Image (spheres, rainbow, N blue to C red):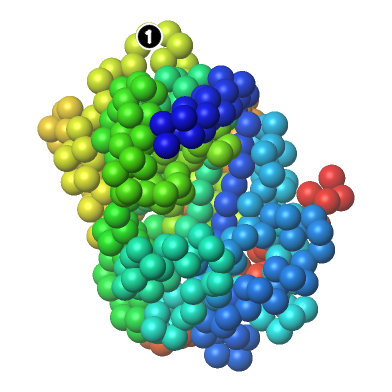
Amino acid sequence: MGAELNEYFAEVEARFDAADDFTVGFEEEFQILAPDTLELAPGFEELRDAAEPKLGERISGELIRSEIEVRTPRAAHFGEGARELLVDRDELFRLAEAHGFTLGATGTHPFSDWRDQEIIDTPHYRLVEERLKYVAWRNNTWSQHVHIGVRGKDRAIAVCDHLRSYLPHLLALSANSPFIEGVWTHLHSARTQTFVRMFPRCGVPDAFGDWDEHRRFYETLVETNCIEEFTQVWWSVRPHHRFGTVEVRICDVQTEPWQALAVAALVVGLAADLMRAYDEGRLPAPESGRTIEENLWRAIRYGLDGKLVDFAARREEPAGDAIRRLVERAAPYADETAVAPHLADVERLLREGNGAQRQARALQKGPTLEEVYAETVARARATSLGLAAEYKEG
């Protein structure tokens, strides 16, 4: 096993050493739905097999047959990645409709029963189910992941260590799952409570300090039969061994594409700020896990309606104000990272409300939970089909 791990890490470390800063990749997970009832429907294999080759290469399964993920290829800059995300959404929504499905884009499904869902038949997910059983069955959740190119393995670890502090802010901004199992949970991200609090090796990792410490821990997990492969480590921010990127995994999937790109732009801008600080030798010590976890709970429970704690200053502040301060940190790198037009939409998201706020407000006006969800499904379709054509023509 030692020789195999050495060979494995030689390849992983070479990827990070050769990585280009600010390349990006985006992943979005969608619910596959029956159009008449908007219940979850097992359509993954049909859609995967029917996709045109370009889209088919970007589609992957994500645990259950009523979920489909689409991944953009590595893009040289954010603008290119944004265009690919919009095109992928457009083509995926059209594919679903052509095969008698529609798609939903919220962090949890509001009323479909997890006991009715089937695990997809792949070696990876058969292993996940065998190891986790109820924990895997119960995980009917949908998220958005952002990959950022960071050159240098120690540098990537430093970015991960410090992005940990921003996970609660990113979750508060992206929260989009107030409903589950027919219940208004009064959580803003029931997805995070369901997934992060149940899965092993999930949530906020410890700060590692350098690549060697990260490698030692991973080797220990393999040698002691805790895991068989890297993808069984589900931390909310991690160095991605296969892609040589830093991956942020804390965010709920966004209903509208402009929201997804606003959230991703903030992630990339913050990573750029941390890379510059690392290069200039001015990164402080990473924040403790216990303080980050305290803020993470506030983000799960209250989202943008709540407050986050600045532990260094020993004070609370509205979540929106805390996020605006992060935008200020990211703004100097907006042109360098090509996020400028989308970073500006963070303020729009704060002003108009995120998915959790919109759905809760709508429910309080009198419609049923099913009617509120139907509106989000319709909005996801309308916005996903509209913008991609403009990007194709451009």
In the figure, residue 5 lies in which quadrant?
A: top left
Give above or below for 234 relative to 43. Answer: above
In the picture, measured across the screen, residue 153 lies left or right of residue 208, that is right
- The residue furthest right is 393
Give coordinates of residue 348: x percent, y percent.
Answer: 50, 49
Is residue 336 visible to us here?
A: no
Residue at the image point whose x is 52% and y is 81% from the top? 40
Mark 1, secondary structure of its residue? loop
Q: Is residue 354 above or below residue 312?
A: below
**Which residue occupies 74% across, 70% down?**
49
User: What's the residue at 42%, 37% (across, down)?
Assistant: 1
- Amino acid found under the numbered disc labelled 1: Gly
Question: Residue 247's spot in the image, x, y percent?
Answer: 48, 40
Q: Is residue 133 visible?
A: yes
Q: Residues within 10 Å of mark 1 (few under 14, many from 20)?
A: few
Q: Position of residue 218 (x, y in %)?
A: 36, 36
At 32% from the left and 48% from the top, the residue drawn is 225
Instruction: State the image coordinates of residue 356 (x, y, percent, origin top left).
Output: 39, 64
Query: Is 199 rendered above or below residue 111?
Result: above
Task: Give the quadrant of residue 300.
Answer: bottom left
* 298 to the left or right of 128: left
Q: Quadrant of the C terminus?
A: top right
Q: Going by the image, does 326 lie left or right of 373?
A: left
- Residue lying at the far left in this picture: please name it: 314
Q: Which residue is disc 1 drawn over?
A: 281
Seen from the viewer's position, the closer of residues 13 and 27 is 13
